[in-house]
Structures are given as structure tokens and as C-alpha cells.
Image: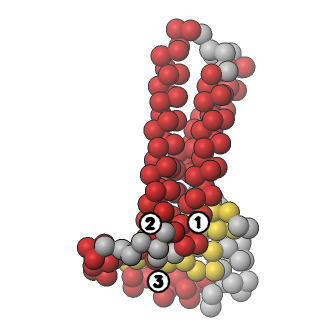
Amino acid sequence: MSKKHRKKFEELVERFVELKDTSELMIDLAYSSLLLNSKELAEDVQKLEQHVDKLHTDFELLVLSSGFEPKEGKDFLGLIRLGVVTEKIADAAAEISEVVLRDIKPHPVLKLAIEEAEETVTYVQVAENSVLVNNTLRKARIPEETGMWVLAIRRGGKCIRPKPHTRIAAGDVLIASGYAGGEEDLKKLASP
């Protein structure tokens, strides 16, 4: 593979990963908005859906303009189809969040499932004096300390899907899920 093609290939991978990660984040946030009955999270999902639409269009244009050989066309058709499916996942997440935004009361079965669940979803703001500040998620060891997993970080009006190397900043809002017993431990870590 030529250097030019390798660069295009790497760009395609990077764009697809962003598309996939964002749609996965949307699903997590959409269900969280239901569990918490949070309009704020539901609105985040709606904003991300518009972002995914743009990501998807940019991804398809990049695939189509990649300049690979016609014999490789079948492989690139598969990439385009993956992009379409990923965008449909984002659309489904947006539809889930619509339930919260339209003030539709949860069905009694959903309400009971939420009450009976051993897991919960919560969000906490990281205080300036928190031990989490300036640590990466890996170093902070939140799952080991609290039993909660950080699904997303709201920072500067945007939701990001965190990676192990993502640094936690004062003012970040951590959206986490896990066993209900760990919720208080997370709050103590984030805001002592």
C-alpha cells in the first residue's frame, strides 16, 4: 500500500471509530436519560444525533473520494453500509430520548424495572479539590473504588465518550453506571 493510500486508510479508520463511538455513547445516554428521567441527557442525545449525521456524511464522502482501485469497491461498499447502520443506531438513540423530551410517562413495567434494578445511572460534578482532578480514568480507578463505570463526561457543553487516557478536569460532569451502592462512593470521590 502506498503512503498516500495508507494515510487515506488511517483517516477512514479514525472517522469510522469516531462515528461508532459517538453512536455507542448516544445509546448509553439515551437509556440513562430514561432511567434518570433527565431532559438534560435527552437533549445531549439530540445534539449528538445532529453531529452523527454530519460525521456520517463526511465519512461517506471520504470513502467515495478515497481513490482506491475499482476491484476494492466491494470492500468500500461494506464500509458505507457500516456507516449507514451506525447512523441508524444513532437515530434509534434519538428516538429513545424523545420519550423523555415529550414528557411521556414511563410504562409501569419500565418503572418497575428501574426500581428493581441493582444498577443505577448517576451523574456527579467533579470539584476542584477532588482527587480525580488531572488524573486519567485509568489512574483514577473509579470502577475499582466505587463499582461505577464512567459512560460519558460532559465538558464545556459537550458529551465525550471517555477513553482510559482521558484526563478528568474540575467542573467535568461524570455520567456513570453501576451498582447503586457505589453511587455515594463516586459522589465522595468527585466532590469531597
Q: CA distance from mark 1 to mark 2?
A: 11 Å
Q: Nearer the viewer, residue 39 or 77?
A: 39
Q: Can you tell which mark lies on residue 183?
A: 3
Residue drawn at x 62%, y 22% is 64
What element does badge 3 sit on? helix
The three-letter amino acid code for the residue at tag 2 is Val
The three-letter amino acid code for the residue at tag 3 is Glu
Residue drawn at x 44%, y 60% is 96
**In the image, residue 157 above or below residue 188:** above
In the rendered structure, the answer to whether residue 130 lies left or right of residue 91 reads right
CB-based contact (under 8 Å), mark 1 and mark 2: no
Q: Earlier in the sequence, mark 3 or mark 1?
A: 1
Q: Can you tell which mark lies on residue 99?
A: 2
What element does badge 2 sit on? helix
Tell me the residue that label 1 is attached to: 43
Using the rendered image of the protein, determine whether residue 85 is visible from the camera's viewpoint: yes
Using the rendered image of the protein, determine whether residue 164 is visible from the camera's viewpoint: no
Residue drawn at x 70%, y 26% is 7
What element does badge 1 sit on? helix
Query: Label 3: few (<14), some or many (≥20) within 10 Å?
Result: many
Percent coordinates x, y for residue 48 in the rendering:
60, 55
Of all residues, the one furthest to the bottom in this rendering is 192
Percent coordinates x, y for residue 182 in the rendering:
43, 82
In the rendered structure, the answer to whether residue 42 lies left or right of residue 4 reads left
Q: Can you tell which mark lies on residue 124?
A: none
| Residue 42 image-quadrant placement | bottom right
The three-letter amino acid code for the residue at tag 1 is Glu
